[in-house]
Image (cartoon, coloured by chain):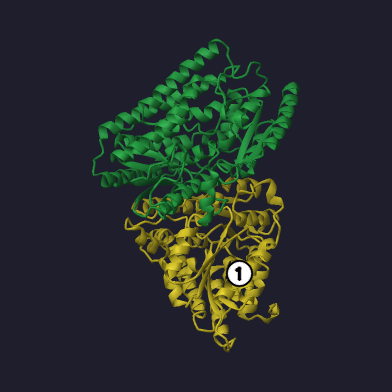
Amino acid sequence: MTNRANGNGLAKVDSYYEDYGSRARALAKEGKRSIGYISAAVPLEIISAAGFVPVRIKGDPGKAVTKADSRMETLVCPFLRSAFDLTLDGRYDYLDGIVIPHTCDSVSRTYDVWKHSVPLPYYHFLNVPHLDDGPSMEFFIHILRTFIKSLERHTGKEISNESLKNAVEAYNENRRAMRAVYDLRKPDRPLISGVEMMKLLSAVKALPVDESTALARKVADEVKGRKKSSPRKPVRVMLVGDQIDDTALIEIIENAGAQVVMDDLSVGSKLYFSDMEATRDPVDGIAKYYLEKVSLPTFYRDSGGSYEENLELRFGHLKRFVSEFSVDAVILLVYKNCDPYGFEVPATTTYVESLGTPVYYLEDEYSSSSLGRLKTRIEAFLETLA
Amino acid sequence: MAEERKQRMTATAAAAKVPKMVRANFTANLKAKEEGRPVAFSFIVNCYDEILRAMDIVPAWAESYSGICAAKHDARRFLEKAESQNFSRSLCTYATCGLGFEAWRKELGGEMPPDAPWGGIAKPDFILGTGQMLCDPRYKWPQAVQHYMPDVPAYIGGFYWPPYDENMDQREVEDYYLKYAVKELKGAITFIEKQTQKKMDWAKLEGLTDLVDRTWDMFIDAYELRKAVPAPMDTGDAMNTMVPLAFMLGTQEAYDFYKALYDELKEKNTRKEGVVENEKYRLLWGAGLPPWFALSDFQYFNSKGAVFPAERTYREAERIDRLHLPKLSDPLERIALRWMRYWTNWYDAARKRKDSIPEVERLIEYIEDYKIDGVVFHQAFSCRTWHSGIMLQAQILKKVYKEIPILVLEGDIVDISSYNEADVHARIDAFIEVVDNFTKRR
C-alpha cells in the first residue's frame, strides 16, 4: 500500500479508499454535515447546494453480513444488504440523513427498513420515475422541487437558484476532471491501473465536490509522469455492472495479466461521461441529466423505433467505449437478486458480441467468499483471449 | 400428497367456478389470435383494465400463465430454458418462466413449446407494462421478452403514488402525481390506437369506469362478510376468487361473480357454515404471493382448525366511498386517482400511531375487523416487490400494536425447488401450538 503520509494524490486516494468516509467524518467534527445516498440516480447537485457533503453509501464485500440478517430479507440485493449492515454497524454514524431513490424494488421497498433501523434526523424517498418521456420529465421536476423543499425544511435555509447553478457547475467540473483520468487509460499501455482507478472512483464518493475534483486532477497529473509500466500490451478489459466498488475483482483480472481499461459501472463512467446542461432554471437541467444521461437499467428508454434501434439507445455507449478505449473483452458482472440488470443480460451480451467483442457474464453475491470461484472462471476466460 | 394437491378443495361454489374462468381467459387470447383480433401481454393491477376492455383488446396475462405452469407443476422446463439464456434463477420467476417459454417458442420458429399447459399463451401484438405499478419486472420483462419477439412493440406507462412520509400529507403532492398518471394513460391510448388503427370509445370507457367502481365495492362487500365467525371463506379460496378482480376487471362477468359470491357468503353466514367445522383459530395472510404449486397448504391449516378470514394479498381494491374521491368527469382522472388513493389509503392511520407504517396499519385494521389470532407471511425468494420489508412489518406490528403470533414461511411463487412439504407442515404445526397458547392466555 502507498504510504499515507506521503500526501500525493494516489496516496490520498489509497487512504480514502481504505478508510472510506474518513474525510466526511472529519468534516462532521468541524460542523460540515453529510447526507448519505444510495445509487447513481440521486442528484448530488441538490444535496451539495443545500450545504451537505453527499456520501455514496457503499458496502464491504470483505465483511460478512450479520446485523442486517434480522431486518433485511436475504432476497434483497446483496450489495444493499452489505451497505445496510455497515450502516447498522456504525460505519456511517456521521451522517445527518439518507436519501433513497426509487430505482429498483430492492432499494425502494426497503426504504422503511432503513428509516426504522437507523434513526437519523433526515430521510427522503426520491420518487425517480423509470421513464424519460415528456410527462415523466415534468413529473421528475416536481419530485426534485419536493426534494428541495424537504431539505430546506430540514436545514431551515432556502436553497437558492444560484447555489444550485454553482453546484451544477462544480459537478460538471468534477465530471471533466474524472474524464481526464479516464483518458489516461486509453494508451496501449494505460497509465493508471484498473485497481488504482477503482480506488479513485470509490474515494471521491465521500468528499465535497471541490475536493473530489482537486483529487482527480492531482491523480491525473501524477500518473501522467509515469513511464510505460509494462513492455507487453495487456488484454484490455471493460467491466460492466452496477455497484462494483471494491478492487478485489479487478485485482483478479489484473493479476491474470489483463488490465481493466474502462467500465460501465454505476460508480464509474455512468456518472462522468455526460455533462449537465446549465439551464436557466437549474432544476430543469438536473432532471434532464438524470433521466436522459445516466444509463442505469432502472431507466426505461424506448424511442419507438425498431428493436435494433432500441438496443443502440440502451447500449450504444458500450460501442463507443469499446472503440475509444480499444477494449478487447467485456466482463459483465451482475449481482444475484438484481432484476434490472439481470433481465438485461441476454440483450447486453448479444449486443456486445455483435461488436465482435467477447463478453463473459458472471453472477456474484457481493461477497469476498465467492472470489475463489470467480478467480478460476475469470482466469479461464482470459486464457482464451491470450 | 400429489393427488391430494390436484384435488384441492374449495369451500365456496364461487371459487370452484374460477379454474374454468381462468381457462376461458387463455382460450380467449388464443382464439383472438386465430381470428386476428388484437392481443396484448399485460400485467394485473396495472391501471389499464378499463382501457383494454373499452378498446376490445384481449389481454394475455403473462404472470398468470407462469402461475398456471407452476400450479400444474410444469414450470421447471421453462425456468431451465430461461437459465440457459443466462437469466438468473434469482430473478422474478413469473418473468423467467415466461421468458423461458418465449425463448423456446422462438427456437421452434413461433410454434408453441410442446405440451404447453392449456395450449399456451398467444404471441401478443403489443405489450403494455408499467413503472412502479407494481414492480421492476413490469418494465424489465417487456424489454427482455422483446429479445425473443423483436417485432412486438411495448408501451410502458409511469404510474406512481406519493411515498409515505409521516411529516407530510400526501395530498400536498397528489396533484402532480395525478396529472402525470393521466398523461401516461393518454399515452397508452395513443399507443393502442396506433397499433390497432381504432379510436377509443370514450363513452364506453366512462361506462366501464363506473362498472369498475361498482365491482370494487361489491368485491369488498363480499369479502367483508368473511368477518363472520365462523368464517365462510378463507384465503385458500381467495387465491381463486381474486381472479375476476385481477384478470377480468372492467367486465360485467367480474361484477356478477362478486355479486354471486356475496349472496353465497351471506347464505353461509345465515346458516353459520364455516370453512372448517370447528373453527379454532383465525389467521391473517399478512403479505406475500402464494406458492402456486402448494395451495393445498391452506387446507393443511384448515385441518388444524385454522382459517384465514382475510388476506392482504390480491385484495387490490377498497370501497370507493372510503377513498374520499372528488367528483371527476374525466374517466382517466377517475382511474388514476382511484388507484392512487387506494395505495395511499392507510397513510393517515399510520401518521396517527407513533412509529407505525401504512402496511402495518392495514394489518391492524384486518386483525381487529376479522378477529385475528395470528399472522402468516410468505416470503417468495424471487420477488422483491412484495417480500422485502416483511420482517420490518412483523417487528413494527408487535411494537406499535400488540404481541401476536407471527409465522414467516419461505418459498417461491413458481420455483418448486425450494419447497419441502414436510418442513412447511412442521413449521405450521409449531405455529399452531403458539397460536393455541396465545388464544388460551388471552
Residue B217, compared with residue A131, is above or below; it is: above
x 43%, y 53%: residue: B107
Locate residue B294, reporting x and y percent.
60, 34
- Tell me which amino acid carries mark 1: Ile
Residue A154, compared with residue B261, is above or below; it is: below
Locate residue A104, reporting x and y percent.
51, 52
**Is residue B348 in sight in this rendering?**
yes
x 68%, y 20%: residue: B280
Q: Residues within 10 Å of mark 1 (few under 14, many from 20)?
A: some
Identity of the residue furthest to the top in this view: B271
Q: Is residue B216 left or right of residue A64?
A: left
Residue nearest the observer in this picture, A374 or A156: A374
Locate residue B145, reporting x and y percent.
43, 51
Tell me the green chain. Answer: B
Quarter of the image where one finds residue B150: bottom left
Locate residue B224, reporting x and y percent.
52, 22
x 39%, y 43%: residue: B41
* Chain A shade in the render: yellow
Q: Is residue B103 left or right of residue B280?
A: left
Q: Point out the image quarter for the N terminus of chain B.
A: top right
x 31%, y 39%: residue: B34
**Is residue B323 in sight in this rendering?**
no
> Circle 1 sits on which residue?
A378
Residue A208, compared with residue B418, is above or below; it is: below
